[in-house]
Amino acid sequence: MPCTLARGTRSALPFRFIHTADIHLDSPLKSLALRNAELGRLIGGATRAAFSQIVDLACEEAVDAVLIAGDLYDGAQTSMKTAIFLAHELQRLDDAGIRTFLIRGNHDAASRITNELTLPASVTTFTARAETVTLTPDAPFEVAIHGVSFRQPQAPDSLLDKFKPPVAGAVNIAMLHTSLGGAPGHDPYAPCQPAELDAMGFDYWALGHIHQRSVQGAASKIVMPGIPQGRDIGEAGGKSVSLVTVADDRIITIEERTVALARFERVAVDLAGVEDWSEMVSRIESALRTARAALDCRHLVARLELSGQTPLSWRLRRDADKLAGEAEAIALAIGDTWIDKITNATVSADAEAEPASGDGPPLQELGALIDGEILQSPGYRQAVEALADDITSQLPGEIRDVLGEDTERRAKILDDLAREGARDILARLQAAPESGDA
């Protein structure tokens, strides 16, 4: 829908802007779409919905500008449909007299259409040379916005030396896509340290790249707004943008505003001492309703994490399909609630005891053999690696990291899958419960 705010009708307020980053428009999904097609469609459109919400928020709050600190797109696979959607939303901001400032991050630099899209005149896309745009808002000071874009998808060196000095007398805002100090197992992107940013003399650093929100800095505000819409359980928790106000006295205040359509959450369900199936179902429902009540957006996507010592442990593994059906029925009854996955870390009431069915010793010996010898053997690991290579080679390029983005992460995922699968097989081998145990 169009913005309701007409050009030139904003009241004389301090300078205000929205800072966001890492929108990843139309990002392709990984395992989520394979597990649940309907949920996949919901989350597949959620990045667009979040961006539309950002535009709505900008209009409702009558801001002067929207700053997007990189990774607006998701990479080379960006389609022209994505570009048309983006142009339409940016036109809404233009119609409301709201300026947009963009820098390109590592994903934007890989996009084939980034340089082909015609955007409204109110949109400034900073180049890789670093530029400064000076604004004269309805405030007792000038505002200078500085920005530098990635020229290539990789930026292993710091980009701080590209910035021009702060504009004297102005409120200076700098835009940078950076991994800051970096993280183990991940490539550095325009690396720098918060202390270096503080020393540059800018008032506000509008950062992007890291998907978790953070606000730090001493001499300046150094803000990573995080991703505005999570795309999988790895991006669980609240997601937001920053609504920033620079008051007449130049004091900067930052408000966190939610724009996400859906929120991923790990929902813990303690089944300690639970002895019958109906009580287990009741605990799942209670946990989901509690998580849903605390939500600040429309949809909850829950990963149920079962734990505790319970006689139902083996049965929960053996009847995983029934467990999933129960959870999905509860989610449907609650409304706007989805089950991403169920993980089962429960243990038997006596983990060392033999199952009452009489199948205990053989199954225990088999379990010990799997854990102690098979899963650790070089031959097994080579076979699993070969199978994983074969599977990933047949996937589209953009989702080939579904089994991990580096060797260490991949090995852990494969180990976890193997152990979980072994437990499920052992549970299915156990004899069925007595009739009436349901």
Image: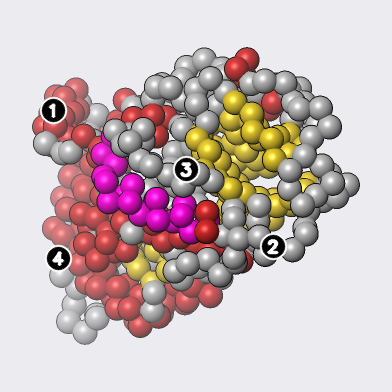
- Callout 2: helix, strand or loop? loop
- Amino acid type at mark 2: Arg
- Amino acid type at mark 3: Asp
Closer to viewer: mark 4 or mark 2: 2
x and y percent of residue 388 in the render?
A: 17, 33
Closer to viewer: mark 3 or mark 1: 3
x and y percent of residue 7 in the render?
A: 60, 60
The span picked out in magenta is: 75-93
Q: Which mark is residue 10?
A: 2
* First of labels 1, 4 by sequence position: 1
- Callout 4: helix, strand or loop? loop
- According to the picture, the residue beneath numbered tag 3 turns out to be 22
- Amino acid type at mark 4: Ala
Which quadrant would the C terminus be assigned to in this image? bottom left
In screen coordinates, is 147 left or right of 244?
A: left
Q: Callout 4: few (<14), some (14-19), or many (20+) C-alpha neighbours within 10 Å? A: some
Closer to viewer: mark 2 or mark 3: 2
Taking the magenta stretch, the answer to whether it contains residue 90 is yes
Which residue is outermost to the right? 249
- According to the picture, the residue beneath numbered tag 4 turns out to be 431
Q: Which mark is residue 386?
A: 1
> How much space separates mark 4 and mark 2, taking CA atoms?
72 Å
**Is disc 3 in contact with disc 1, using a CB cutoff of under 8 Å?**
no
* First of labels 2, 3 by sequence position: 2
* First of labels 1, 2 by sequence position: 2
In screen coordinates, is 120 left or right of 376?
A: right
* First of labels 4, 2 by sequence position: 2
Q: Nearer the viewer, residue 186 or 109?
A: 109
